[in-house]
Image (tube, grey):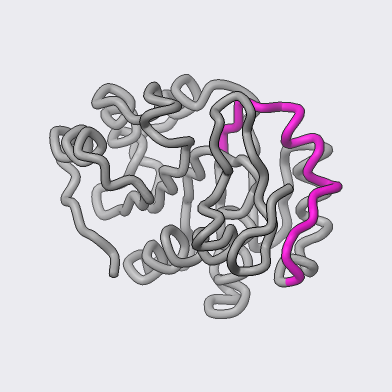
Amino acid sequence: MTLSEDGSYTAYSKEYEEHYHSTRDGALHESLVKHVIPAFNVIKEDEVNILDICYGLGFNTLATLLHCKRNFPNKKLNIYSPELDTLLVKSLENFTYPPEFDEFRDVILTLSREGVCKDKNISIEVFLGDAREYIKKFENKFDIVYQDAFSPSTNPMLWTQEYFADIKKSMKQNSILTTYSIAFATRLALYKNGFFLYINR
């Protein structure tokens, strides 16, 4: 584990030779500021379908639960998240999360052990496998997509024009995709698939 700037811990992937989050921004801060808050500033529906690419350490999913519990306690959340690293997901019950996530300890344990967690307000599915194949099963489904795979330079398969075409098919018409990447190739692939591009400041 690596301590990040906001006091939350992240981890380092030897396979991709990158941290799961910016150690400068902080793991929790990055999830909230780059993904969750911008998305929910746009999407106002009472029931929201979210595609979280990729589950990783679970920060985007857990930060979504945190943000909505604080601000939209009656909102229904359906979160679908592919993750290729099965061993990582199984290990997360022992990960040191920030205290803000303490109230979601049961969610963390259930997802780590069973991959599915449901109650009256949330439905979360962690799919263990290839994100590229997983997204092809959905059409006109998602209000929000968190595009949070490892960077285009280390994981280019999840940033191609063809990949974003499948993402676009899985999204509703008035939906939003968030990402940390502002690489030209990323912006071009999104643009060619009909996305309108904005920088969140």
Q: Residue placed at 62% from the left, 64% from the top?
A: 65
Q: Residue placed at 72% from the left, 41% from the top?
A: 116
Q: Is residue 89 magenta?
A: yes
Residue 190 image offset from top left, x and y in percent:
22, 38
Left or right of 135? Residue 79 is right
Q: Nearer the viewer, residue 63 or 173?
A: 63
Residue 126 image offset from top left, x and y in percent:
65, 37
Q: Which of 17 and 179 is in front in this view?
A: 17
Q: Nearer the viewer, residue 105 or 72?
A: 105
The mark tally for this picture is: 0
Quarter of the image where the C terminus is located:
bottom left
Position of residue 69 relative to residue 175, above or below, is below
Left or right of 105? Residue 8 is left
Toward the bottom, the furthest residue is 71
Q: Residue placed at 44% from the left, 29% from the top?
A: 135
Read off the magenta span. Answer: 81-99
Q: Residue placed at 49% from the left, 39% from the top?
A: 53
Residue 185 image offset from top left, x and y in percent:
22, 33
Q: Does the magenta stretch include residue 201?
A: no
Left or right of 173? Residue 64 is right
Occupied quadrant, residue 200: bottom left
Position of residue 16 relative to residue 118, above or below, is above
Left or right of 23? Residue 133 is left
Q: Nearer the viewer, residue 3 or 156?
A: 3
Occupied quadrant, residue 161: top left
Position of residue 6 relative to residue 87, above or below, is below
